[in-house]
Every structure is written in C-alpha cells, then in structure tokens.
Image (cartoon, rainbow, N blue to C red):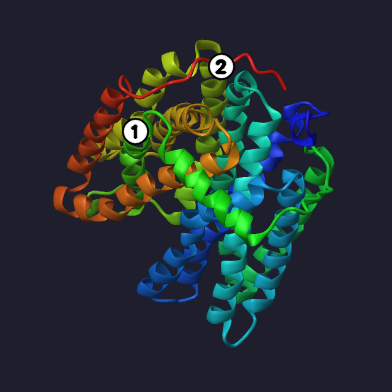
Amino acid sequence: MTQDTAPSRSPITWVPSLYFVQGMQFFVVMLIAGLMYKNMGVANDQIARWTGLLGLAWAFKPLWSPFLELARSKKLIVVAMQFTGAVGLGLMALALQLPMYFAASIAVFFVLAYASATHDIACDGLYMASLGDKQQAAYAGWQGAFFNASKFLTLGGLLVLAGHLETRFGVFNAWSAIFVFLAVLLAALASYNAWALPGTLNTDHADLTVASVFKTLAEVVKDFLQKPGIWLAVLFIVLFRFAEGQVQTIGPLFLLEARNKGGLGMTTEQVGGVYGTVGTAAFLVGSILGGYFTAWLSLRKAMPVLIVAMAVPNAVFYYLSSALPTDMLHIGIAVAIEMLGYGFGFVGMILFIMQAVAPGRFQTAHYALGSGVMQLGFIISKTISGDIQIQMGYEHFFLWTIACGVPALVLMFFVKFPALAAKNS
C-alpha cells in the first residue's frame, strides 16, 4: 500500500474537517465576496464581472490536476493549501483597510481562489485513494454535508455577525474583523488536518518535469475522452444539475423579493437565520442518510431515488410561490423539507463521478475533469435562470424547474454504472 491508501484513523476523524475546509474556502470567494462588496457600495456590474473571473479557478482546475497526480503526497498539498488560505484571509483583513481596497482585495481573492481550487483536487484525490468504493459511498454523506454546511453556517451566522459589526464599527472594519476570524479558524483546522489526515507530509518526485507534466495532461484528456460511454456520462452530469442551478440561484432571491412582486418579502437576516438553523440541520441529516442509503442499495439502484430527491427543492419553492405563506414557522418547515431533499439527492452526483467517471489510470485528474463538467452544468443553468424567471414569473419558473429534472431521470437508464467493487482500504 502507498502512503495515501493506508489511513491510520477512522474516516470520521478527518472527512468532516477536510470537506468543511473545502467548502469554507470556496464559499468565502464565491458567496461572501459579492455580498461584502455589495455592502461596501461596489456597483453590481463590477461585482458580477470580478467574482465571475474568480470562479474561473474552479473551471480551469483540471488543467493543472496532472501536476498533483504526480505528487506522492496528496496530504502535503492539502495542508499547504489550507495554510495558504489562512494567510490569504489574514491579508484580506489588511487589504480592506487600504485606499485601493478593491484592487488589493481582488488580488488576494485570486490567490485564495486558486489555492482553494488546487486544494479541491488534492482533497478529493486523497479521499478516493484512502477509501474503497463502499466507504466512499458511506462517507459521501458526511463529505457533502460538511462541504455544504460551511455554506449555510457562513450565510446563517457570518452575515448576521457582519451586520451587527457594521452598525458598531463600520463596514470595512467589520469585514476586516470577519476575515481575521476566518484566518484563525482556517489555521486551526489546517493544523488539525495535518495531524488527522491519512498519509504523510513528505514528498519526493525527482522525475517530475514540465515536459512530462504536459505529456501526462494530454494522456489524461485522451484517456478521459476514450472512456466507454463518457459522452452520455457528461450529458447526464450536466442534466443532473440543470434544475438545481436554477433553483439554488433564484430560490434565495424569491425569499427576499417583495410580496408585491411575487416573493416572500423576507429580510436578509431572516433568510440567513432560516438556512443557518433548520436548513443546515436538515441538509446534514439528508446528506448523511443519502450516503448510507446509497451504500446499502448501490449507486445504480439508488440513483432514481436520488434524482427524485433533487426535485424536492423545486417542488417546495413552487408551493411557496403559490401559497405565499407569511409566518416564519410555515416557511421554516418548507425550507427544512427543501434542504433535506437537496442533501439526500446531492450525494448521487458526487458518487457518480467518483465511481463511474474517475476510475482508471488517472483517478484524481479524471475526478477533477468530472467535477469541472459538473460545475459547467451548474454555471450554464445559473446563467440562464434569471432570464427564464423574468419571462415566466416565480410560480411558473419553479414549475419549469420541476420539468427540468425529467431528462436526467430518463437518461439515467442509458448511462453506464459500475458494479460496486469489493475494494478495501
């Protein structure tokens, strides 16, 4: 066994912390940045343009994944990128105090984005190399739960805290304090992961050259495109997230939208509070149950249920847009059901890429390519969701998203699923 395939501790001691960090770094760049700039008075077109450019890090990350494939220690890369992120968050606190804060903070965000994207590749590679198929399925729930928990805990807690600090110390000082807190938190988690993760921190790969890396990249792409049934798999991945991207983009806007425009008229604090409490709890439960359910039934047999579960948020928002409830208890229960279904179903795509797309000579790199395709599907649907919603209105839009889940359900019967291998770590 290699150092990355012989975990010395139970996965429960490192999977949650590993994927919480992965999610935290991603959502700080892709969610918190835009909200922070909005509070600082930056124009919407500037926010969209620059945060969109930041997102290219995750679209392009498969291009440097072969470099990580050749490294003997994925743990070293994971821990190094986590400490890089901690330093970057600290620098962000200082950048916000400069006269040219926008340019300085964008530069730091670019470092954070590419460090986070690199961390994603090594982190997923470590997960796959350290666990067999059955363990991957069992812990995929924990993986997805803590990745997305970082999102909802950030939106549910960090924004509320930032709002309180802004009223007392001003916007810039408040966000500098937030980034100091995040830097300390990430440094602590990086230190813990340096101890808990399987593998060692040493690496030695003297035969690594630029030419060999580019040769490997060409081999990776060629091998990926020659996989049996890969084009159907790519289409399935895109369609799996087609409805999700639309609902997850428009849903929060619908909650904030004024009632005279068809929304629920909630405040930002109310939305953050609901998703940070019952939403987070429901997602955690759904993700964990989805992982164990899939491990028990096998991915092929579980996939129809997982796809249907992904349609639960669409149905919930359709109901909310029709009923337009006013009491928070009613809305909170609906959000809990939404997030339970979302967490349960999201496991399906993680495992499909791991077990049906990634396996082969370049497992880590092919998982990165599969993840890139998954993000592409999300981005495509996210990009067009606003135009569709404006044309249809909220109620008809959410009904449309329910229909958008049908193609993936049909295509599922034609894509190739592997038999669950008896691989032990």
Q: Secondary structure at mark 1?
A: helix
Residue 131, quarter of picture: top right
Q: Give the spatial CA distance, label 2 vs label 1.
A: 21 Å
The amino acid type, in three-letter code, at marker 2 is Ala
The amino acid type, in three-letter code, at marker 1 is Phe
Residue 219, position as x, y percentages in the image: 52, 45
Q: Mark 1 and mark 2 in contact (Cβ < 8 Å)? A: no
What residue is rendered at 63% in x and 61% in y? 210
Q: Is residue 72 left or right of residue 175?
A: right
Residue 11, quarter of picture: top right
Judging depth in this view, the residue of 364 and 78 nearest the camera is 364
Q: Is 27 situated above or below 281?
A: below
Residue 174, position as x, y percentages in the image: 63, 70
Q: Which residue is mark 1?
A: 236
Tell me how many marks there are.
2
* Disc number for residue 295: 2
For label 1, count other residues whose C-alpha is less than 10 Å away and answer few (under 14), some (14-19) or many (20+). Answer: many
